[in-house]
Image: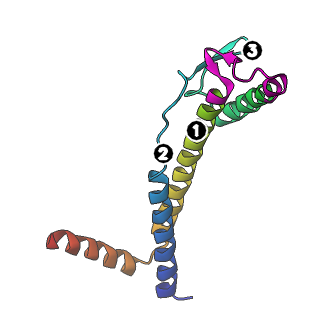
Amino acid sequence: MNNESNDQRILLLKKQIETKKEKLNRSSKFSPVTNCSIEFEGVRSNIQALPKEQLISLMVKLNSLLLSAKDLGVSNEYTISGYGLVDWITDIKAKIEIISRKDEEKALKVMESKLEGLLSEGKKVELELNEIESILKN
């Protein structure tokens, strides 16, 4: 393949990355229902500070409690640290989504950087000139 066709593929991939980044930016922000401070099994944790793996583990444990509470008919009355299990699970899911979104943003930036380095020098110059030209037109 020649440089021109590679440059076209690179620009197409960069456009796809930009579309994904825009989609990620439109995602919702974290608006917790709880105060994010949960005491569970004798340990107080702030779900804002926990890594993804611990959040998943906590969510699974809380969900098993929720299923048990439903079976026993007490799911509406059963609370942990002042909030219902559904509220905790909702907040943890939202926090996991934010962490996943940040991880994806990092991966997209790495890919974008790699693609930028693969562009031919001629194409890089052309893109810079186009950018300067568009700025001067405004």
- Image coordinates of residue 78 in percent, x first then y, are 71, 18
Q: Residue furthest front?
A: 73
Asked whether 95 falls inside the magenta stretch, the response is no
| Corner quadrant of residue 41 | top right
Q: Do tag 3 and tag 1 residues touch (Cβ < 8 Å)?
A: no
Residue 133 sits in which quadrant? bottom left
Label disc, if present, on residue 94 of the rendered structure:
1
Three-letter amino acid code of the residue under disc 1 = Ala
Please state the extent of the stretch shown in magenta in the rendering: 67-87
Q: Earlier in the sequence, mark 3 or mark 2?
A: 2
The relative height of residue 132 versus residue 30 in the rendered view (above or below) is: below
Q: CA distance from mark 3 to mark 1?
A: 22 Å
Quarter of the image for the N terminus: give it.
Answer: bottom right
Identify residue for label 3.
41
Residue 107 figure quarter: bottom right
Measure the alpha-carbon separation of dots 3 and 2.
31 Å
Q: CA distance from mark 1 to mark 2?
A: 9 Å
Tell me if residue 137 comes above or below residue 27 in the rendering: below
**Residue 90 image offset from top left, x and y in percent:** 62, 34
SS of the residue under disc 3: loop
Tag 1 secondary structure? helix
Name the residue rendered at 67%, 17% in the picture.
79
Q: Nearer the viewer, mark 3 or mark 2?
A: 2
